[in-house]
Amino acid sequence: MNSIDAYKTIDADGEAIFKDKGSKFLGFAFHVQTEDEVKIIQKNLRKKYFDARHHVYAFRLGPEENFYRASDDGEPANSSGPPVLGQIKSFELFYTLVVVVRYFGGTKLGIPGLINAYKSAAQMAIQNAHITERLISKVLRITFPYELMNDVMKLASQCKLETSERIFEQNVTFSFLVAASSFDDCMQKFEKLHKLVIL
């Protein structure tokens, strides 16, 4: 499948525990659509694990805007948030949030130890989640007279379109899901049909 047409994300959450020198790292992987969802999940985790020393997180949203963020949450700079984000990128995930909650065990791990611990907890949480591939699609909505039905269906078949809505009134209105990379090409083909209107 064309990489522009699809992306990977989590559709079932994952959890994991990584331990090192008494410190316990709880990893959580979630599917998120917006930054607001990220904040809600963080708030709930902070409430549930209120006695933890750090709540490190990283997230990446959609493939088109490619918006991402990472936080060390009080750990030394770049020792925790970036390694967590690195795992999201290494699994090629979008619309994904990973939070690693740390309970300090009394022994300092040093920067290399922290990087390894946060990376490992994130990696394990992602591996315990369910990863799926989703299409990047746009909606093409058209209306046309009944006599064009055969032409429309032929074009829909050529473009391999999935119908998401059909309304039969005075005219016919169809909504199609079109792979993002072939949207313009398909639209141009439909525009050539006389009496067909793209909504």
Image: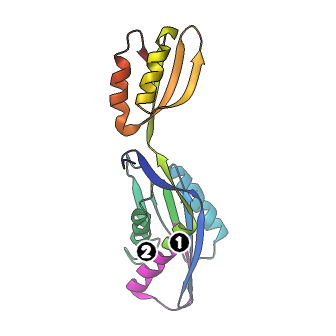
Q: Is residue 106 magenta?
A: yes
Q: Which structural element holds mark 1? A: strand
Residue 43 shows up from this direction: yes
> Viewer-proximal residue, 169 or 14?
169
Q: Which structural element holds mark 2? A: loop
Q: Is residue 6 above or below residue 138?
A: below
The residue positioned 50% from the left and 15% from the top of the image is 149
Question: Label 1 neighbourhood size at 10 Å, few (<14), some (14-19), many (20+)?
Answer: many
Q: Residue 11: horizontal and vertical position, in percent?
A: 57, 55
> Viewer-proximal residue, 129 or 80?
129
Which residues lie in the magenta part? 99-122
The image's colour scheme reads: rainbow
Left or right for 46, reference 150: right
The residue that label 1 is drawn on is 100
Q: Work out how far the residue at label 1 is from the one at label 2, CA to CA, in angstroms.
A: 9 Å
Task: Please give the label number shown on residue 15.
Answer: none
Q: Is residue 190 magenta?
A: no
Locate the C terminus by quadrant: top left
Q: Are marks 1 and 2 in contact (CB under 8 Å)?
A: yes
Which residue type carries mark 2? Ser
Q: Residue 122: horizontal and vertical position, in percent?
A: 50, 71
> Viewer-proximal residue, 46 or 185?
185
Which residue type carries mark 1? Val
Residue 199 shows up from this direction: no
Q: Residue 94: horizontal and vertical position, in percent?
A: 45, 55
Q: Is residue 16 above or below residue 135?
A: below
Q: Is residue 169 above or below residue 82?
A: above
Q: Earlier in the sequence, mark 1 or mark 2?
A: 2
State the image quarter where residue 78 is shown: bottom left
Question: Label 2 neighbourhood size at 10 Å, few (<14), some (14-19), many (20+)?
Answer: many
The residue that label 2 is drawn on is 80
